[in-house]
Image (cartoon, rainbow, N blue to C red):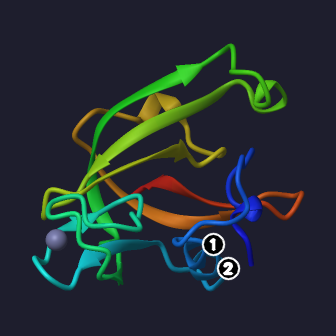
């Protein structure tokens, strides 16, 4: 599967981290980990973010984290207009990794607070596009 299957809009089909989308189809959210220095990255990177080594592998992202911040977009960028309004959030995990994603569409925003426990899960949109989303724990 190519990267064109990722997210609401995808701008490239071929990349060394394209298996990321295959993992999403399997229900896994994966990051990259360097075989040389052990640095982890999310979103996955084709080369190590710390030592620039091309010798990287996959690891499954932690599931539970805390919501660091969130914001609801009433006006969306070009290509995303049909999805607005939607809420974006930043999740921090205990090991320092961060993940940026939409909150699940059925989230009651009155219940959303900075610092609350959240989980992340894969998401398939009605048109078959794959992504991941934040869910209140
Ligand atoms: Zn490295």
From the viewer's perspective, tell me whether residue 79 is left or right of residue 17.
right
- The answer to which image quadrant residue 48 occupies is bottom left
In front of the other: 54 or 102 = 54
Residue shown at 49% from the left, 46% from the top: 101
Residue shown at 76% from the left, 60% from the top: 4
In front of the other: 130 or 54 = 54
In which quadrant of the rendered image does the N terminus lie?
bottom right
Label 2: which residue? 25
Note whether ligand 1 is within 8 Å of mark 2: no
In front of the other: 63 or 100 = 100
Label 1: which residue? 21
Q: In the image as oriented, which residue stretches furthest toward the front?
A: 53
Splitting the image into four quadrants, where does ligand 1 fall? Answer: bottom left
How crowded pointer 2 is (Cα within 10 Å; few <14, some 14-19, many 20+) is rated as: some
Circles 1 and 2: CB atoms closer than 8 Å: yes
In which quadrant of the rendered image does the C terminus lie?
bottom left
Give the vertical position of 90 relative to 28 (above or below): above
How crowded pointer 1 is (Cα within 10 Å; few <14, some 14-19, many 20+) is rated as: many
Mark 1 or mark 2, whichever is nearer to me: 1
Measured Cα–Cα span from mark 1 to mark 2:
6 Å
Give the vertical position of 111 relative to 17 (above or below): above
From the viewer's perspective, tell me whether residue 74 is left or right of residue 127.
left
Residue shown at 84% from the left, 29% from the top: 82
Q: Position of residue 44 (x, y in %)?
A: 40, 65
The number of numbered badges drawn on the structure is 2
From the viewer's perspective, tell me whether residue 51 is left or right of residue 23.
left
Q: Position of residue 68 (x, y in %)?
A: 26, 38
Q: In the image as oriented, which residue stretches furthest toward the top?
A: 75
- The answer to which image quadrant residue 15 occupies is bottom right
């Amino acid at each position: 599967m190519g990267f064109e299957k990722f997210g609401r809009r995808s701008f490239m089909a071929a990349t060394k981290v394209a298996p990321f989308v295959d993992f999403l189809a399997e229900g896994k959210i994966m990051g990259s980990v360097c075989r040389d220095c052990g640095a982890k990255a999310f979103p996955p990177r084709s080369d190590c973010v710390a030592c620039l080594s091309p010798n990287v592998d996959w690891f499954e992202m932690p599931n539970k984290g805390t919501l660091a911040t969130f914001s609801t977009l009433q006006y969306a960028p070009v290509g995303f207009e049909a999805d607005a309004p939607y809420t974006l959030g930043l999740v921090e995990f205990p090991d320092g990794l961060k993940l940026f994603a939409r909150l699940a569409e059925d989230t009651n925003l009155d219940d959303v607070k900075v610092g609350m426990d959240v989980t992340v899960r894969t998401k398939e949109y009605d048109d078959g596009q794959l992504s991941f989303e934040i869910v209140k724990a």
